[in-house]
Protein backbone atom coordinates (compact mmCIF):
# COMPACT_ATOMS: atom_id res chain seq x y z
CA UNK A 1 0.00 0.00 0.00
CA UNK A 2 1.32 3.44 -0.82
CA UNK A 3 1.80 6.31 1.60
CA UNK A 4 -1.22 8.21 0.30
CA UNK A 5 -3.55 5.29 1.05
CA UNK A 6 -1.90 4.73 4.44
CA UNK A 7 -2.55 8.37 5.35
CA UNK A 8 -6.15 8.21 4.12
CA UNK A 9 -6.77 5.00 6.08
CA UNK A 10 -5.38 6.61 9.25
CA UNK A 11 -7.71 9.58 8.75
CA UNK A 12 -10.64 7.16 8.31
CA UNK A 13 -9.65 5.36 11.51
CA UNK A 14 -9.43 8.67 13.39
CA UNK A 15 -13.06 9.42 12.47
CA UNK A 16 -14.23 5.85 13.16
CA UNK A 17 -12.71 5.98 16.64
CA UNK A 18 -15.04 8.88 17.42
CA UNK A 19 -18.28 7.01 16.63
CA UNK A 20 -20.16 6.89 19.93
CA UNK A 21 -21.11 3.60 21.57
CA UNK A 22 -24.56 2.55 20.35
CA UNK A 23 -24.36 4.67 17.19
CA UNK A 24 -23.45 3.94 13.57
CA UNK A 25 -22.32 5.95 10.60
CA UNK A 26 -21.84 5.26 6.90
CA UNK A 27 -18.86 4.88 4.63
CA UNK A 28 -20.06 7.90 2.66
CA UNK A 29 -20.48 10.08 5.75
CA UNK A 30 -16.89 9.38 6.76
CA UNK A 31 -15.67 10.08 3.22
CA UNK A 32 -17.58 13.38 3.12
CA UNK A 33 -16.15 14.40 6.48
CA UNK A 34 -12.65 13.83 5.13
CA UNK A 35 -13.34 16.02 2.10
CA UNK A 36 -13.42 13.01 -0.21
CA UNK A 37 -17.16 12.61 -0.78
CA UNK A 38 -16.69 10.20 -3.69
CA UNK A 39 -14.43 7.87 -1.73
CA UNK A 40 -16.98 5.79 0.20
CA UNK A 41 -15.59 2.60 -1.34
CA UNK A 42 -12.10 3.52 -0.17
CA UNK A 43 -13.49 4.02 3.36
CA UNK A 44 -14.89 0.50 3.03
CA UNK A 45 -11.44 -0.78 2.11
CA UNK A 46 -10.03 0.97 5.17
CA UNK A 47 -12.67 -0.63 7.39
CA UNK A 48 -11.86 -4.03 5.89
CA UNK A 49 -8.17 -3.47 6.68
CA UNK A 50 -9.05 -2.45 10.26
CA UNK A 51 -10.04 -5.93 11.42
CA UNK A 52 -6.80 -6.29 13.40
CA UNK A 53 -7.07 -2.86 15.01
CA UNK A 54 -8.95 -3.33 18.27
CA UNK A 55 -9.38 0.42 18.81
CA UNK A 56 -11.25 0.94 15.51
CA UNK A 57 -14.96 0.10 15.87
CA UNK A 58 -15.42 -1.00 12.26
CA UNK A 59 -18.70 -2.72 13.19
CA UNK A 60 -20.26 0.75 13.59
CA UNK A 61 -19.75 1.60 9.91
CA UNK A 62 -22.51 0.50 7.51
CA UNK A 63 -23.74 1.51 4.08
CA UNK A 64 -25.96 4.54 3.45
CA UNK A 65 -29.13 2.48 3.86
CA UNK A 66 -28.06 0.91 7.15
CA UNK A 67 -27.12 -2.45 5.67
CA UNK A 68 -24.33 -4.50 7.25
CA UNK A 69 -22.45 -4.75 3.98
CA UNK A 70 -19.11 -5.32 5.72
CA UNK A 71 -20.26 -8.23 7.85
CA UNK A 72 -18.41 -10.85 5.84
CA UNK A 73 -15.11 -9.27 6.96
CA UNK A 74 -15.78 -10.17 10.60
CA UNK A 75 -14.90 -13.53 12.13
CA UNK A 76 -17.95 -15.73 12.57
CA UNK A 77 -21.19 -15.43 10.71
CA UNK A 78 -22.93 -12.77 12.81
CA UNK A 79 -20.15 -11.03 14.74
CA UNK A 80 -20.85 -7.57 13.31
CA UNK A 81 -24.54 -7.89 14.21
CA UNK A 82 -23.71 -9.27 17.67
CA UNK A 83 -21.34 -6.38 18.39
CA UNK A 84 -23.97 -3.83 17.35
CA UNK A 85 -26.72 -5.55 19.34
CA UNK A 86 -24.47 -5.65 22.41
CA UNK A 87 -24.46 -1.84 22.15
CA UNK A 88 -28.26 -1.69 21.91
CA UNK A 89 -28.47 -1.28 18.12
CA UNK A 90 -31.26 -3.44 16.70
CA UNK A 91 -30.58 -5.36 13.49
CA UNK A 92 -33.08 -7.30 11.39
CA UNK A 93 -32.26 -9.01 8.09
CA UNK A 94 -28.78 -7.46 8.06
CA UNK A 95 -30.19 -3.95 8.35
CA UNK A 96 -30.17 -1.44 11.21
CA UNK A 97 -33.65 -0.89 12.66
CA UNK A 98 -34.47 2.82 13.17
CA UNK A 99 -31.33 3.73 11.25
CA UNK A 100 -32.03 7.48 11.46
CA UNK A 101 -32.22 7.32 15.26
CA UNK A 102 -28.85 5.62 15.73
CA UNK A 103 -27.05 7.38 12.86
CA UNK A 104 -24.11 9.55 13.89
CA UNK A 105 -23.17 12.34 11.51
CA UNK A 106 -19.38 12.78 11.74
CA UNK A 107 -19.45 16.33 10.36
CA UNK A 108 -21.67 17.37 13.26
CA UNK A 109 -20.17 15.09 15.90
CA UNK A 110 -16.56 16.11 15.37
Image (cartoon, grey):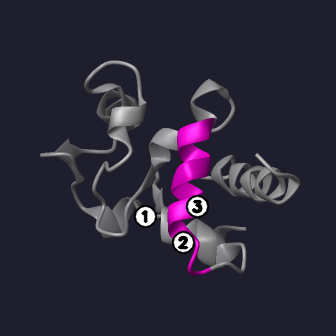
Q: Secondary structure at mark 2?
A: helix
Q: Secondary structure at mark 1?
A: loop
Where does label 3 land, which residue?
A: 42
What's the distance in space between the residues labelled 3 and 1, CA to CA? 20 Å
Where does label 2 land, which residue?
A: 29
Image quadrant occupied by the C terminus:
bottom right
Q: Tag 1 or tag 3, which sits nearer the N-term?
A: 3
Q: How many marks?
A: 3
Q: Is residue 80 left or right of residue 96?
A: right
Work out whether residue 57 can be spotted.
no
Foreground tag (2 vs 1): 2
Residues at discs 2 and 1 in contact (Cβ within 8 Å):
no
- Give the residue at x 12% y 46%: 93
Q: Tag 3 or tag 2, which sits nearer the N-term?
A: 2
Between 17 and 87, the one nearer to me in the picture? 17
Foreground tag (2 vs 3): 3
State which region is magenta. Answer: 37-49
The outermost residue toward the right is: 3
Q: Tag 1 or tag 2, which sits nearer the N-term?
A: 2
Foreground tag (3 vs 1): 3
* Within-10-Å neighbours for mark 2: few <14, some 14–19, many 20+: many
Give x and y (percent) for residue 84: 37, 37
Amino acid sequence: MDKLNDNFFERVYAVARQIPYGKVTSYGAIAKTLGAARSARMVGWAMNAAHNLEDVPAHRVVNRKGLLTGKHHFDGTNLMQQLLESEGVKVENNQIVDFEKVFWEPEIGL
